[in-house]
Image (cartoon, rainbow, N blue to C red):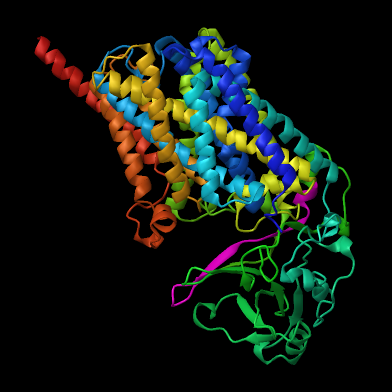
Amino acid sequence: MIHATSPLAIAVFVLFVAITLVLSSYLGKKAKSSAGYFAAHGQIPWFVNGVAFAGDYLSAASFLGICGMIAFYGYDGFLYSIGYLAGWIVALFVVAEPMKRLGKFTFADALNARFNSPGIKAAAGISTLAVSIFYLIPQMVGAGVLVQPLLGLPHWVGVVLVGAVVIFIVVTAGMVSTTWVQFIKGALLLAFSTLLSVLILWRGFHAGDEHAELASQSSATRGTARLTADNAALDAPNAVAEPATNHANLRPSGYVFRSLGPFTGDLFDNEQLATNLQALSGSKLLPPTGPWQGTQFVQSQDRDGIVTTWSLRTDNEGRTSLHEAQTVTKRSDGSVLVNGLPRGTKAGENQLHPVGRISRLPRGETSTGPLGPLEFFRILQQSEVVLWPSKTLVEPDGSSTTVYFQKPTPGSQVLRPGESPTFAGIRSDKFFDKLNFLSLMLALFCGTASLPHILIRYYTVHDEAAARKSTIVGIACIGFFYVLTLYMGLGAMTSGSLEPSDSNMAAPLLARSFSELLFAVISAIAFTTVLGTVSGLILASAGAVTHDLLESIGGMKMNDHERVRIAKLASVVVGIVAISLGILFKQMNVTFLVGWAFSVAASANLPALVMLLFWPSTTRQGVIAAIIVGMLSSLAWILLSGDTFANVYGLPKEGSIVPFSQPGIVTIPLGFLTLIVVSLLSRGKREMQAA
């Protein structure tokens, strides 16, 4: 079972959370003033701040989303890593020192240093809220994903739990607590990701199912009672797989997938296939109906009425073989079936079996032994990996079945870009597909230096030199981690521990394939990863509400104590909003959601910040217009995109009125253009009035 609750994991999880809460309570004594609450008095050491940068930036998207995307599609997930890391070059050479020099508490401080304009404060404050809340969504989704296998609780409970803990962290100690939580979390994430990568290299690759020799036999699903030798049918034409008795060949779930064939001619009039199916608990082939007609799938039903789905694969000689697939059926009455049985962990219930293996190694080897860092990629390139893509079929009554099926894939294909739907545009002949890819990479490159929770971290160090040095430390830590994601993602792809319906759990389940203790620690670290990032985002939002909107725009006169009290109340409200959105966006990959957040940040904030620093003709009106136009245009584009139509509204992608999903390549230049035009017009008008 993939989501078996572990008492050890619960104990480690509770320990990590308890340490975090105690640390926050202790450090709360140092954050009584607004300078302490919002900026830690500017006394954080530059090295600590640099590692905290990594802890803040290496979010659920980096750890869970990128590893999961690499595990499901290969190299494509690493393209996100490249984009994220490249963005730090902008942060180092463009914004690090000016942000420390110009600002005090919030991003708006830096923009408003020259103009002292309530309009800039309002626009920047609203932009900070929009970007922070958008970025909070994938963090909260990732939190729910983690709590499911760790504590055996529903997704929404995990989201609420994270929200409650983070609100406590921010309310008790502000930036002081947030910084140290991020520092500890960043250091632990780097250390244990390194350990996990070393273990992956030490284990090497194994063909078939030999790597699962320590498999658990505790599953109560039907798979435990119907074990068969994987691919036996492919080695002997028209043979049916025999029951497996050697437990060294079992997967971690205690299940090995069946194959039949190859066969020639019409499958529905093939006596040998009928005989083989009859040997499998009296199964018989079902004629395809409704959405199953004309697909690559067929179904069989055994004497107990349990339906098994098979994917069809045709070889070069025109022969067809059947390979057992996995299914999740959501009925119109709300019930869910997994592989033909009710979903659950009790007797007579079922869960999806873990997947992910190498089917063939170079020269017919069965295992490689320990591998070097570069040898790992060379061997994988010459191997064949079994991936598990999916396809959803919708019945006339509204029920739907998602089929997860085996797809043998050359390792060389896994290591090339363009295999995932997100990056398919790289090799697409369609102009808008290519534009969508370029738009995403532009947003990742420009977005880092525009994220409010990253920018306010420059206020926590003593001077501009410390800001620059902490950025360099952050780049080193982040770059090293992103290299490790490639090993962790590809290691998960071949570990036999993947959850085929949930890419976000790839890294923790990979750790479980080594030991329960490592799973517990990695899951707890991933949880604190979410805590650190969410704390920074909520703190940035609270600062925007208190310092930028209420004080500067609302005209509220607050003393130091009142300013901190209002910021804490704002933290609670933002936390509740984040919890609600985390539950709503449950089904979306966290990395994909972060790509949207980067687009909004780069479109709304970067044009104003860059032009303010490097174009003397920038005016107050230009800054305000650029922020508003960039923010609204990027949000509108995202809300009208095909991906939002399909994954949020439940409508056909074709109903979208924008040609591609990622807005950055349109909305970022639009922000720059708006600022230039409005600045020239407003400056010209002022000069005419002066004359």
Queried whether the magenta region covers residue 383, the answer comes back as yes
Queried whether the magenta region covers residue 401, the answer comes back as no
Where is 281 relative to 326, above or below? below
Seen at 76% across and 38% down, the residue is 197
Residue range corresponding to the magenta coloring: 379-400
Q: Position of 200 compared to 302: left or right? A: right
Residue 265 image position (x, y, % from top left): 69, 88
Residue 489 image position (x, y, % from top left): 68, 45
Residue 605 image position (x, y, % from top left): 38, 28
Camera-side residue of 665 and 225 = 225
**The image quarter in which residue 359 lies:** bottom right
Seen at 85% across and 54% down, the residue is 214
Quadrant where the N terminus sits is bottom right
Quadrant where the C terminus sits is top left
Q: Position of 535 compared to 55: left or right? A: left
Seen at 56% across and 17% down, the residue is 27
Report if residue 510 is visible in the image. yes
